[in-house]
Every structure is written in structure tokens, then in C-alpha cells.
Image: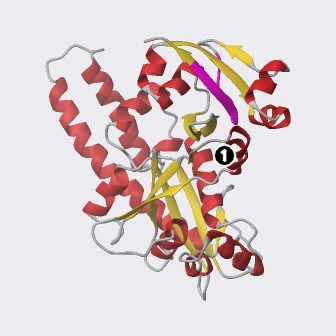
Amino acid sequence: MKDVGLVGVPFAGKSTLFTALTRTGVSGGRSNQAVVQVPDARLGVLAQMERSRKVVPSQVRFVDVPGGATAQGLAALRETDALCVVVRAFGPGANPAAELEEVSAELLLADLSNVETALENARRRTKGRAAGTAATQEVSVLERAHQALASETILRDAGFDEEERKLLRGLAPLTLKPWVVVANLEEGASLPEGLPEGTVGVSAEIEAETAAMDPDEARLLLAEFGIDEPGLDRVIAASYRALDLIAFLTTGEDETRAWEVRRGATAPEAAGAIHTDLQRGFIRAEVVSYDDLVAAGGWDTAKHKGLLRVEGKDYVVREGDVLHVRFAV
């Protein structure tokens, strides 16, 4: 399960969006957290087809930190996997592009302070050590990170390779995390210009008003406002894209379940998302695409028609794959 932290300037509607996304009220305190199910219509179809006793969707935890960029707030945000930057696109004087710049500057300065401290400590540890050691390599990466931040470049855009990013992730930098920008819109409004590609538009106040309603009734009411897809669905989809995640599925009489895994994961890595024993003892995976399985009408029929593939350790799992893992402990 991934954590998505909500951040924004005061009065952007961050807490209203939290209520809309999580269908909960805001209770105050250091941070408000709520776990929500990832909408996936495929689960119901498979569960009915395989007569599953239980359906288990993937989950996402949203974290709303009151108080903005305080020390406690930043610490809570550093623990998340991605950030949802909320900007106000309603009411007089709204300037969502300027708000995004303001939030970016705050997060950049927080990272700059964090990197400065880490760099000082790393330099002390390298005294008297030969060049090329892990400590001196750490100093080199931190110096580049400091230079980028000092020149107002967020770390995500600073050209670090994956090994260097792993080192930096030890500091949990906010500008290295994936960001999803959410524009809080007026009823019926379109996305304003000047925001990055992939920005999600949500009328948070309208959707928050439906938070306590039955989900089906809420969808009908939102449709009257011209909202065909709830904000939760769109924000989660954007978060999955930002985190580079896909979903694979398992199904049977016991349960039908969705699992999240990074794009490019191999079959053993996907098996490990289910249970570590499955990854350690992985033998092979029986795989069929969701569409092929539904078209066949069931697992046994898909196997009989030759739609089922047997894949080994090098197989890269695809979005919507339905897996059955064979393993030995």
C-alpha cells in the first residue's frame, strides 16, 4: 500500500479534498490519515465468474497534514511515497500556477536545508578517507543535490541515476517524490492554463458533500453536476501513473484480489507482492490477460482454449494480468 500526502497553501481546499477522497471527516491532530480502496471494476466481474467468497481491492492511504510546511508537517510528508499538490482554481483572484510555484519553492527550501545538514555530516565522515570510498561518493552526490536545489532545480529534474536516487532517498527528499497536481475547481469549470500536463481537476466541495452518501447515490448526484468519474478514481489513477505502478490480479473460489507492483516487475517480484515465500520458491506463473479470461468465461475454459501461458522468472508482468503462481518452499 502506498501513502499519498496532501500539500497546498492555506485555503486551497486541501482538507476538503481529503474529505472528498476518503469519505471521512477531518478530526484534527498532527495528521489525518485514511485508507481507501482502489476502484477496479474488474474485481467484481472476476469474483462473479469464479464464485469467489471474498473480494479484496488494492488500497491507498491519503495523509492530510494540518499546518502546512511546519517541521512536523514536513516530517509527515517525508514518510509518504508521493505528494498530491492541491492548488485553488476557484473564487476571485485564483492563480493556481502561482500557488504551485509557491508550494514547489517551500518544498525545495525544505530539501535544501535537509541536504545541507546531510552534506556537512558526510564531509566530516570522509576526513582522512581515500577517494572512491562509499563516503566520498555520498559527498559527491550530496554536493550535486545541493547545487541543484540552490539553483532552484527540484531533485526529480536534476539528472540523478537510479543508484544516486537510492542514496538520496535515505533523506526522503520531498522534491524527489512523484507529484500529482490537483486543481480544486468551481462547479462546471475546466482546468485553467499554466498547469503541468496530467493535472487532475476536482470540484472538491461538491464531492465532499457526497462523502457520507451511498457510493451509487453519490455517483448519480455527481452526474447531475456533469461529473462522470469521481475525483477519487482520477486522483488514484494519476497517483498510480506518477508512482509507475500497475495492477495484476488473482482469482479463485477463496478470493479475487488486486495487487500493486511497479511497472517492469518480473513474475517472481509480483509473486513476492503476494507473499515473500512465493518469491523465494517461485517455479513458474500461469498467466492470462483479464480480457482473455473474461472472454473465455473462466480459468478452466481459458486453459482449455490455450489462452493460458506458462511464464518463467524473466516474464515482465503487464497491467491486468491474472496470475496463478506455482512455487515450492
Residue 192 in the image: state x and y as whole percent.
70, 72
Can you tell which quarter of the image residue 203 is in? Answer: bottom right
Which stretch did the figure color magenta?
315-325
Quadrant showing the C terminus: top left
Q: Residue at x 71, y 46 (%)?
A: 48
Residue 201 drawn above or below residue 117: below
* 212 lies left or right of 301: left
Membership of 210 in magenta stretch: no
- Which is more toward the observer, 186 or 272? 272
Task: Please say whether residue 16 is visible from this viewpoint.
Answer: yes
Residue 76 drawn above or below residue 51: below
Look at mark 1 in the image and give the residue it sits on: 43
Membership of 321 in magenta stretch: yes
Residue 102 drawn above or below residue 294: below
Q: Residue at x 62, y 38 (%)?
A: 246
Q: Residue at x 26, y 61 (%)?
A: 72
Please tell me whether mark 1 sits on a helix, a strand or a loop. helix
Residue 112 drawn above or below residue 191: above
Q: Name the residue type under label 1.
A: Leu
Label 1: how many Cα within 10 Å (few below 14, some 14–19, many 20+): many
- Which is more toward the observer, 158 or 184? 184
* 85 lies left or right of 117: right
